[in-house]
Image: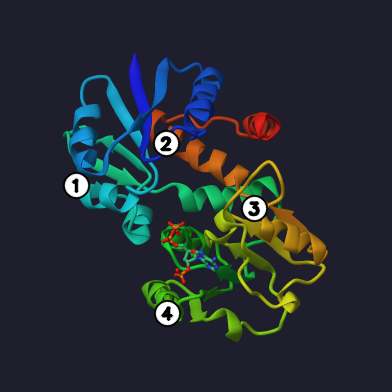
């Protein structure tokens, strides 16, 4: 049967095999989905080796998303703008195609799963790395009113903002220059919580109607989610739903069928330890 996999390093703890296997059951699709650990020098070779015969699609995770983008011979607009790809497959003519479903995953989780109003929203994004770049185009396409990108390294925030000013009102600053005013939505796209850290953000950005979203997730509230709860933010949401929604969009790109996600999110949440 058709074969799919997530490729990365490390990849052993990826939830993607579990998620896609569940999607296949829910949609009656005959496929297998595994995890492939690749050493850095072998990435391009391993992509080519996998995507032949029954090997129909790959998800790409750290640290290879930029290399997947560079390797592709065709890119969706959202992948083009993200500068990174999380989804690879072959076009009918054999060319390697790249997509990026991370941003639409975030938008669907915020808007459709959690009812967060994106149209016209004033958004503060923390971080300016690959994870943030991957979601900028879909956020702007969803009609947010403005995005302020705040980052520890200000120059990175400025460079990232400049890539998206043609799509909307996008600006950049350091954490110390974030205005002490409430935002409609605050998104943490830094990897600070991996070190148990929290970007130094003024409490005034959070008001009773502010939605706070961490692109990371865990069994326990992330440091950012805990911070937002302590400030009585209107909504506090972690990135588990984004993970499932980006997978659902990749599944849809490959299979032409969009799986139901709510039960998969619930099951995954229950299985976190
Ligand atoms: P990713 O692919 O996860 O985005 P990345 O491109 O390395 O990874 O970006 C990591 C982001 O988290 C950056 O915005 C980084 O800030 P710098 O650009 O200043 O390095 C941010 N980050 C990482 N650790 C952080 C910390 N302890 N406090 C604040 N920001 C942090």
Does any atom of ligand 1 lie closer than 8 Å to the CB of label 3? Answer: no
At 37% from the left and 58% from the top, the residue drawn is 82
Q: Which residue is mark 3?
A: 111
Query: Is label 1 in contact with label 4 (beta carbons under 8 Å)?
Result: no
- Disc nearer the start of the sequence (1/4): 1
- Disc nearer the start of the sequence (1/3): 1
| Residue 213 falls in image quadrant | bottom right
User: Is the residue marked by circle 3 packed among few (<14), some (14-19), or many (20+) residues within 10 Å?
Assistant: some
User: Is the residue marked by circle 2 packed among few (<14), some (14-19), or many (20+) residues within 10 Å?
Assistant: some
- Disc nearer the start of the sequence (2/4): 2
- Disc nearer the start of the sequence (1/2): 2
Query: Is label 2 in contact with label 4 (beta carbons under 8 Å)?
Result: no
Residue 219, horizontal then vertical, whole percent: 68, 41
Query: Is label 3 in contact with label 4 (beta carbons under 8 Å)?
Result: no
| Residue 137 falls in image quadrant | bottom left
Q: Which residue is mark 4?
A: 158
Tag count: 4
At 64% from the left and 69% from the top, the residue drawn is 121
How far apart marks 1 and 3 lie (CA) works out to 32 Å
Q: Which residue is mark 2?
A: 11
């Amino acid at each position: 049967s058709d074969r799919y996999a997530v490729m990365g390093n490390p990849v052993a703890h990826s939830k993607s095999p579990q998620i896609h296997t569940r999607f296949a059951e829910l949609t009656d699709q005959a496929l297998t989905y595994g995890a492939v650990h690749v050493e850095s020098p072998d990435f391009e070779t391993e992509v080519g080796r996998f995507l032949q015969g029954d090997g129909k699609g790959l998800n790409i995770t750290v640290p290879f998303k930029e290399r997947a983008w560079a390797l592709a011979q065709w890119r969706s607009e959202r992948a083009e703008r993200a500068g990174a790809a999380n989804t690879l497959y072959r076009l009918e003519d054999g060319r390697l195609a790249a997509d990026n479903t991370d941003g639409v995953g975030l938008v669907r989780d915020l808007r459709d799963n959690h009812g967060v109003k994106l149209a016209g929203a004033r958004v503060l994004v923390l971080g300016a790395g690959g994870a943030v770049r991957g979601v900028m185009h879909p956020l702007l396409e969803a009609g947010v009113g403005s995005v302020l990108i705040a980052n520890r390294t200000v120059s990175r925030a400025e460079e990232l903002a400049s890539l998206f000013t043609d799509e909307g009102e996008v600006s950049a600053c350091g954490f110390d220059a974030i205005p002490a005013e409430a935002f409609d939505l605050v998104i943490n796209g830094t990897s600070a919580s991996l070190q148990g850290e929290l970007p130094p953000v003024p409490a005034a950005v959070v008001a009773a109607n502010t939605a706070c979203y961490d692109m990371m997730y865990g069994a326990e509230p992330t440091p950012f989610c805990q911070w937002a709860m302590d400030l009585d933010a209107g909504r506090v949401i972690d990135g588990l739903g984004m993970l499932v929604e980006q997978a659902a969009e990749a599944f849809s790109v490959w299979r032409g069928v969009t799986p139901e996600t709510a039960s998969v999110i619930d099951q995954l949440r229950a299985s976190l330890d």
